[in-house]
Amino acid sequence: MDSIIITRPVVVKVRVTEKYKAALLQQLEYSMRRLDLELARLERRTGPGGGERTESEPQLEGERRKQSEARRKLLEQARDVQLLQPGNELVHGRLESVARLHVGDDWQKLMGVEVLVEDGRVVEIRSRSGGMHDD
């Protein structure tokens, strides 16, 4: 047997642009607004005249702390996003691709594949050796 078909990891990176930063900040703001609504709902349930009390106070307080911590983390992420510089590359995720492995292939080159995305478009496919990868 001279070759087999394998799956290999592919790292997906995003090149930071002003458009990308704006989209990330918009997502974070949306998540913070949702958390704010949830926190307000919890406040109404635990405050004076909080209506029905089907859940225990400790459970509601624990949920309120959890939501507050999540909001704090979102604010921290928003600060980090604002510090990103255009041109920086961030790991966005990992995928798998199918490749044919031949006897004599360079293992590092075959396994070290990255896809670079900028503003929703693939701008480069790289191998660890630095060149373009052909498949």
Image (cartoon, grey):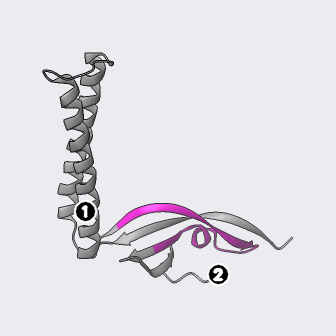
- Which residue is at the far left? 48
Residues drawn in magenta: 90-115
The percent coordinates of residue 101 (x first, y second) are 72, 71
Taking the spot 23% from the left edge, 69% from the top edge, the residue there is 22
Taking the spot 19% from the left edge, 23% from the top edge, the residue there is 50
Question: Is residue 113 among what the camera can see?
Answer: yes
Amino acid tagged 1? Gln
Please name the residue that numbered disc 2 is placed on: 135
Tell me the quarter of the picture where residue 92 sits.
bottom left
Looking at the image, is mark 1 or mark 2 earlier in the sequence?
A: 1
Nearer to us: label 1 or label 2: 1
Which element type, helix, strand or loop, lies under badge 1? helix
Please name the residue that numbered disc 1 is placed on: 26
The percent coordinates of residue 28 (x first, y second) are 26, 56
Q: Quadrant of the C terminus?
A: bottom right
Taking the spot 22% from the left edge, 56% from the top edge, the residue there is 29
Taking the spot 22% from the left edge, 50% from the top edge, the residue there is 33
Between 102 and 77, the residue placed more toward the observer is 77
**In the image, residue 98 lies in the stretch drawn in magenta:** yes
**48 with respect to 109 (left or right):** left
